[in-house]
Image (cartoon, rainbow, N blue to C red):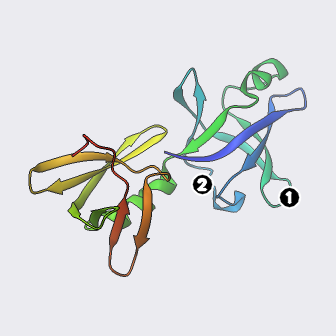
Amino acid sequence: MLKIAQVLKSNGTDGGLLLSFFDVSPEDIDLQEPVFIEFDGLPVPFYFESFTRRGNNRAIVHVTGVHDLKDADELAGASVYADYFEEEEEGDLTGWTVKKADGTPVGTVTGHEDIPGNLCIYVETPHGEVLLPLHEELVVSMDPEGKVITLTIPEGLI
């Protein structure tokens, strides 16, 4: 899942939340799809009941099950995730060649695994399929034209 926003604070006494969006514009949010708010390290699904933009990257929202100030205050500081953005990105990587940072070919991306907070890709190697984390700190470069992704791969993963 892709982290799309942070709950900044409660707003009003009727359960409103002020969200700040990251790399996603509020108009790109699909109000028919659930978002996931992290509780005790686990994603819990919520649907938007109302959504009012406030500037370029903020919105005041109401979500299912949060109807008072006490519940809204419990969400302050929580991360908000969506899985419908990631599907578009991940589909683009299927068939890409994976290389190590030194240029050594590793294999071909065959799929992905949706692990909350940790996107992973399946890579078919000469020794079988492996699951590699696709964390931004491990990505050295991406070449969309050549469909090549270069990763710093921690020792022992392949």
Q: Which quadrant of the structure image shows residue 125?
A: bottom left
Query: Which numbered disc, 2 or 1, marks the residue that appears first in the sequence?
Result: 2
Three-letter code, disc 1: Gly
Residue 30 numbered tag: 2
Q: Residue furthest bottom?
A: 145
Indicate the position of residue 16 as horizontal and vertical percent values.
81, 34
Residue 55 numbered tag: 1
Q: Is residue 141 above or below residue 127?
A: below
Residue 8 numbered tag: none
Q: For numbered disc 2, what is the local secondary structure?
A: loop
Residue, x 80% and y 28% (percent of image)? 15
* Disc 2 crowd, CA 10 A, few/some/many (<14, 14-19, 20+): some
- The Cα atoms of the two marked residues, 2 and 1, are separated by 18 Å
* Disc 1 crowd, CA 10 A, few/some/many (<14, 14-19, 20+): few
Q: Is residue 71 above or below residue 146?
A: above
Front residue of 100/5: it is 100
Q: Residue furthest front?
A: 102
Front residue of 91/69: it is 91
Three-letter code, disc 2: Asp
Q: Residue furthest right?
A: 12
Q: Is residue 25 above or below residue 2?
A: below
Q: Nearer the viewer, mark 2 or mark 1?
A: 1
Indicate the position of residue 23 as horizontal and vertical percent values.
64, 58
